[in-house]
Image (cartoon, rainbow, N blue to C red):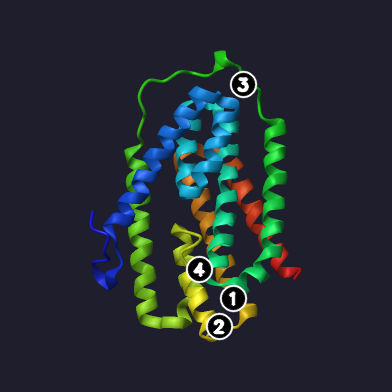
Amino acid sequence: MPDVYMGPYNAWNPHVILEFLVIIFSISIAGKLAVQLLGARYGLLLTGLIGGFASSTATIHSMGALAKAQPQLADRAALGGVLSNIATLLQLLVLLELLAPQVLKLFLQPLCFGLTGMLAYSLRVLYFAKPITPSRVEAKEGLDIDWQSLLTITALVCFVSYSTAALNAAYGQSGLWVGAALSGLVDAHAIVPTVAFLQTQSKLLLQDSLVPLLIALSANSLTKSLVALNSGGLGYAKKISAGVWITTFSVWIGYWLK
């Protein structure tokens, strides 16, 4: 697919959209192989950690599909989805280090609060997770693909990409906060280059530079909660939502205490 932006406001990149779908397929396959090679106890946790660096949202979707197909793995799948948030925070750290190191200094405390909150919740889920024995894990041939969920996510990516581009074209800098919320619905990191550019051009005060990042992170948490509900059902979504929102609120607390 062409790696160029096209359509109204140049909002759509076919290569990026296809890449997102390939990530979902890849994580689904990686999750199945990890469970087969390492067992359900550790395979899903490893998949969550590694998959989050490709796409935390896609990882949560894939873990939800597995939780729905094999309910006995729901606790481990949910924990894998929650652990994918480690990658979300670490990717923010790396991008800020490369693009806006001054902003990173302000973000370190909220980051530490977020990681602490997420790890505390993960340990709680791990402690209360139902034990898994090999006899309870169902071996499944092939890979079940939920095409309806994939098409829903694709439509969401296209819609938010268009809305953000239109907003930026119409309102420019004044739409930063709204643009952060819209872009965060798809990707928590998409707003970082904009924040870095405005801050280095003295168009955004340093002490205000964290707000759009936190707005994007919060919007992304909403997306993850909805994706979890769509892919894994209410029980899975409750565990995922608790994990991602505890992480998000912890980041906000770290910001407010600065």
- Of residues 115 and 182, the one drawn nearer to the viewer in this rendering: 115
Give, as a three-letter code, the residue at label 2: Leu
Q: Which residue is mark 3?
A: 132
Q: Earlier in the sequence, mark 3 or mark 4?
A: 3
Give, as a three-letter code, the residue at label 4: Val
Q: Which residue is mark 4?
A: 192
| Disc 2 to disc 3, C-alpha distance | 51 Å
Element assignment for label 2 = loop
Q: Earlier in the sequence, mark 1 or mark 4?
A: 4
Q: Is residue 201 above or below residue 235?
A: below
- Which residue is drawn at the image coordinates 55% and 83% (left, top)? 204
Element assignment for label 3 = loop
Element assignment for label 4 = helix
On the image, the x and y values in percent for residue 42 come to 59, 29
| Residue 243 visible from this viewpoint | yes
On the image, the x and y values in percent for residue 91 come to 54, 57
Labels 3, 1: front one: 1
- Which residue is drawn at the image coordinates 45% and 38% (left, top)? 62
Q: Earlier in the sequence, mark 2 or mark 3?
A: 3
On the image, the x and y values in percent for residue 18 come to 30, 50
Q: Is residue 182 left or right of residue 129?
A: left
Q: How many marks?
A: 4
Q: Which residue is mark 2?
A: 204
Marks 2/4 in contact by CB < 8 Å: the verdict is: no
| Disc 3 to disc 1, C-alpha distance | 45 Å
Labels 2, 3: front one: 2
Marks 1/2 in contact by CB < 8 Å: the verdict is: yes
Q: Quadrant of residue 109?
A: bottom right
Marks 1/4 in contact by CB < 8 Å: the verdict is: no
- Which residue is drawn at the image coordinates 47% and 33% (left, top)? 31
Give, as a three-letter code, the residue at label 1: Ser
